[in-house]
Image (cartoon, rainbow, N blue to C red):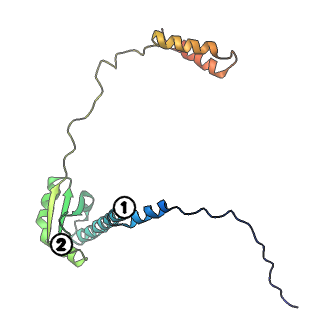
Amino acid sequence: MSLSPAPYFYMNFAPKPVRTKAAHEWLEYLRDSEGLGGILAKTEDLAKLKITLKAALLEMDLDNLAPKIEPGWRSGGQDELFLLVNGASVATRLQQILPSLINELAKKGVVCTGIKVRLKPAPPTWEIKPREGHQASQKPRGFNSVARASWESLLDKLAPDSDLRKAVERLLHSKPK
């Protein structure tokens, strides 16, 4: 008994679309250090820094501070770390442990010569509030004369058995004059 190879079936597929140069230009932009690739790399570095900072704080039994801290590198170089914190108490506590924190970060592979602790800017104290009294005491108004005339002219154009006509009639009956 001899085994013959299985028959081959050929299918005609639609031809592949021609790649445009624009797609390649975008890929090059994304890979470029000034493009989105650079932004993504910096974001990834900051995420790793945050994880390392949390691990260092855990070693010092201060991991409860980690969610209150946003780390980043000073824009001038990669050797000075800055920490944005929510409150003055967190900032004070970090100031007290800076030398130990620098040593702990160095053990975890993050080399920095100094750390600056800064408070996050406070959110604005003002907020937009609705007008008091004036709008709360107003009763809902009906249509003005122009709007009512427009709805009534639409009503005249609709078929008598139309669902839309019934909806417009309910609208006109529910709004006071």
Position of residue 100 measured from the top left corner of the image (x, y, whole percent): 15, 72
Position of residue 133 measured from the top left corner of the image (x, y, whole percent): 29, 19
Residue visible at 75% across and 68% down in the picture: 11
Q: Is residue 169 visible?
A: no
Q: Nearer the viewer, mark 1 or mark 2?
A: 1
Q: Secondary structure at mark 2?
A: loop
Q: Residues within 10 Å of mark 2 (few under 14, many from 20)?
A: some
Residue visible at 60% across and 62% down in the picture: 17
Residue visible at 66% across and 64% down in the picture: 15
Give whichever of 52, 44 is nearer the camera: 44
Quarter occupied by residue 130: top left
Q: Looking at numbered disc 2 in the image, what kind of residue is underneath it?
A: Cys
Q: Is residue 10 visible?
A: yes
Position of residue 137 measured from the top left corner of the image (x, y, whole percent): 34, 16
Q: Which callout, 1 or 2, points at the residue further toward the start of the chain?
A: 1
Q: What residue did someone put label 2 on?
A: 112
Q: Secondary structure at mark 1?
A: helix
Residue 39 in the figure: left or right of residue 102: right
Quarter occupied by residue 83: bottom left
Give whichever of 138, 89 is nearer the camera: 138
Quarter occupied by residue 112: bottom left
Residue visible at 83% across and 88% down in the picture: 3
**Distance Cα–Cα, label 1 vs label 2:** 26 Å
Q: Looking at numbered disc 1 in the image, what kind of residue is underneath it?
A: Leu
Position of residue 119 measured from the top left corner of the image (x, y, whole percent): 16, 54
Q: What residue did someone put label 1 on?
A: 36
Q: Quadrant of the N terminus?
A: bottom right
